[in-house]
Image (cartoon, rainbow, N blue to C red):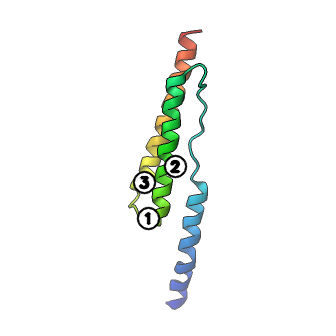
Amino acid sequence: MSRRITSVVFAVPLLLAGFAASAQTPPRNVSAHRHPNLAAAQRLVDRAYQRVVDAQRANEFDLDGHAAHAKALLEQADAELKAAAQASNQNHR
């Protein structure tokens, strides 16, 4: 029993470190020259994502999955901004 507890005590921090390492901000890939408003929105998404990562670290990742869900939604918003820029590029050649 104590061996199992010891394993858990050592495994949990390693698991959390793995999650932290895999937390990457969404890539900024909207041209600020062609789409200044969309690029600005993408920068704000990036800042929001980083603040969620900071909150996770500050709370030792004990946020009941809500922060991870927020990060997923921010990644989705980032993808939509890129899609909007691409649509604009196609419609206004």
Q: Callout 1, which amino acid?
A: Asn
Locate residue 31: give its quadrant. Answer: top right
- Residue 67: assigned label: 3
As measured in the structure, the alpha-carbon distance from the residue carrying label 2 to the one carrying label 1 is 14 Å
- Label disc, if present, on residue 50 of the rendered structure: 2
Q: Are marks 3 and 1 in contact (CB under 8 Å)?
A: yes
Give the quadrant of residue 39. top right
Which badge, 2 or 1, is on the more N-terminal residue?
2
Helix, strand or loop status at disc 2: helix
**Which sits earlier in the primary sequence, circle 3 or circle 1?**
1
- In this figure, which residue is indicated by the disc labeled 1? 59
Furthest-top residue in view? 93
Q: Quadrant of the C terminus?
A: top right
Secondary structure state at the residue bearing disc 1: loop
Q: Few, some or many C-alpha atoms within 10 Å of disc 1 (few <14, some 14-19, many ≥20)?
A: few
Q: Which mark is residue 11?
A: none
Q: Residues within 10 Å of mark 3 (few under 14, many from 20)?
A: some
